Each structure stands twice: as C-alpha cells, then as structure tokens.
Image (cartoon, rainbow, N blue to C red):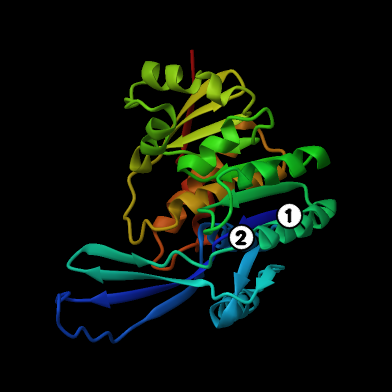
C-alpha cells in the first residue's frame, strides 16, 4: 500500500468570474469544491491508477467532515487524526485569465496533537510499502516535523517521497536519514541552495551534486512544459514532454508525484519511472478538475515522453 500524507488539508473552492470587481459585489454562478491539499491530490491520482492507497494526515471540524465525505465519494480510503479545531478553506478566484488565491493558514496544532499523529503514523507503516509526504506543515508543528516522520519511516524500512519546500524540506535534507525521492522545481532548488540555479545541464548537474542531496536516490527537478531534469543515484537524465493544451495546471506537480510513487511501488525501470511521472503530470493539466487524470489517454502520452541519459 502507498500511504499519502497531507498534514494541512483543505477544501479547495474555485470561483470563476468574468470580471473581478474590487470593493464591490461579485456574484458566482458555478462553484467547485473539492477535498484539497497536495497529498489528497496525490492520493486521488494513485486511486485512479488503480493502486492501493490510504490518505492520512490531520483534520477537524465541519470542514474536516466534508473532506472525508468527498474522499469517501471518490472511494479513496482514508484514516486521519481527528482534532476539534477547524480545517481550512482555500479559495481560488479565476478571472480575466488570472488566478487570485486566498489561502487560510489552517488550525494551530498543539505539541500533543503532533505527537498523537506520529504515534498513529507508526501504526500505519505495518501495511505500507511507500509513503508520500506533500505540502505545507500546519501551524504549531516544528520545522523538523517531516524529518521526525522520516526517522520513523527509516526505522521501519519504508521509503518516503517528499514534495515540500522551504524550511520543512531543508530540515529533511540536513539530517542523516534522507528521503528516497524529492521533487523540487527550479525556484525551490534555488531556495534550498541559496543561489540562483540556471537551467543549463552543467549548472543543474553541479546543483544536484551538492552535499545536501547526498543519499537521495531520486531527485526530479520539475521544469513545467520543459519536462524535468533528474538525478537517479549517480546518473543524470533529461526528460522532455510534448506540447499540450493546458486546461488547468494546478495539481500537476501532485499528479507527477502520484505517477512517480506508483512506478516506484511497482519496481519499474528508470525509464518507466520517469515516463510515468511525467505522463500523470501532463494528464492532470489537461483536465479542468485538480488531481484528476484520464487514464484512457495514458498510453498515448506515455509513449510521447522522451528520456535521455546524459554523459
């Protein structure tokens, strides 16, 4: 089973408006609400790939209840630590070809609630072969909380894919126990290293050879429409994807993590791992809903992904 962790889930609310009026009334005809958070997008895509997945994390209140209801409707197994505090809403206003986001911080977790989830997590690993950790930490948890999760996973021999950014990701990388895979973009890679990383092959090779990444099996640097640059063990790869009609790019990184996780779970070859990850990312951008892919198109786009091993 793949365990998909989302520590700060949300209800994602989308408001499409022809023209957004500031300091005035904006009426919305169509509203889309989905169980959101990066890890829930990962779980949703894994489920669509017909692989066994369990969504977990921390949620509470009526918003938390709604998230569970939505996951159950989509037949996504879930087991969250329930708290009394209210989970968050995240609002996206789609207007004039732009997207304005209003993101709630979410609940403030106590030290005891953080410890309670770690205990719950330990018990879940007995039936888990791979873990994905996605998104931000809720307020109240220490910046090294993901590392605490990683320590528990290492003791149980379960590999972990981490898709986070900023201090929570850096804390993961500063310790001896390293994730099995990470998926930064260029901006996140630059932030980690404290220097502007250029997209040239030599620059990216130099960046990924930094001692911060020692011990990480897979580093997938996502580059949007340009595909990805990858280090697997000591080898480097350039992955290119075809031009596609983008409908909704939100969640494409999460879909990429889902494809990566499924391929790793199935012990696929390097080429297949990278092609599956890129394919699910592409398929997500072609759908209006976030965290959805059309598996009927999978083979067509899988065959169009090119993986080049670099000298």
Query: For this view, does 227 lie left or right of residue 23?
Result: right
Relative side of 198 to 59, left or right: left
292 on left or right of 98? right
- Which image quarter: residue 205? top left
Out of 54 and 224, give the one closest to the viewer.
Answer: 54
**Between 235 and 102, which is closer to the camera in this rendering?**
102
- Numbered badge on residue 43: 2
- Mark 1 and 2 residues: CB-CB less than 8 Å, in contact? no
Which is more N-terminal, label 2 or label 1?
A: 2
Mark 1 against mark 2, which lies toward the viewer?
1
Q: Is residue 133 visible?
A: yes
Looking at the image, residue 94 lies above or below residue 301:
below
**Residue shown at 54% from the left, 24% from the top:** 212
Residue matched to label 1: 118
Labelled disc at residue 220? none
Image height of 72 relative to 248, above or below = below
Categorize mark 1 by other alpha carbons within 10 Å: few (<14), some (14-19), many (20+).
some
Disc 2 packing (10 Å; few <14; some 14–19; many ≥20): many
Task: Return the x and y of residue 33 as percentages of the image width and height.
Answer: 44, 77
Residue 96 at x, y percent in the picture? 17, 67
């Amino acid at each position: 089973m793949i365990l998909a962790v989302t520590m700060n889930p949300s209800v994602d609310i989308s408001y499409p408006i022809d023209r957004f009026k500031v300091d005035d009334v904006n009426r919305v005809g169509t509203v889309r609400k989905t169980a959101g958070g990066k890890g829930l997008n990962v779980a949703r895509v894994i489920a669509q790939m017909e692989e066994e997945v369990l969504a977990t994390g921390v949620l509470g209140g009526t918003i938390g209840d709604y998230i569970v209801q939505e996951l159950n409707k989509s037949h996504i197994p879930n087991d969250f630590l329930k708290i009394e505090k209210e989970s968050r809403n995240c609002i996206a206003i789609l207007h004039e070809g732009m997207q304005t986001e209003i993101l709630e911080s979410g609940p403030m977790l106590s030290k005891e609630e953080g410890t309670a989830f770690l205990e719950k997590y330990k018990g879940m690993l007995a039936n888990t072969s791979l873990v994905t950790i996605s998104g931000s930490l809720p307020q109240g948890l220490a910046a090294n909380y993901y590392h605490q999760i990683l320590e528990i996973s290492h003791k149980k021999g379960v590999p972990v894919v981490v898709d986070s950014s900023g201090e929570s990701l850096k804390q993961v990388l500063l310790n001896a126990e390293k994730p099995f895979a990470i998926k930064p973009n260029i901006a996140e890679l630059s932030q980690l290293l404290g220097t502007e990383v250029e997209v040239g092959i030599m620059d990216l090779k130099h960046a990924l050879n930094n001692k911060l990444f020692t011990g990480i099996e897979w580093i997938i640097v996502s580059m949007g429409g340009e595909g990805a640059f990858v280090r697997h063990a000591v080898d480097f790869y350039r992955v290119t994807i075809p031009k596609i009609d983008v409908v909704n790019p939100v969640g494409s990184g999460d879909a990429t993590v889902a494809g990566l996780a499924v391929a790793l779970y199935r012990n696929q070859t390097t080429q297949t791992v990278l092609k599956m990850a890129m394919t699910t990312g592409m398929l997500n951008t072609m759908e209006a809903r976030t965290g959805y892919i059309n598996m009927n198109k999978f083979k067509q786009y899988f065959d169009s992904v090119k993986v080049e091993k670099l000298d």
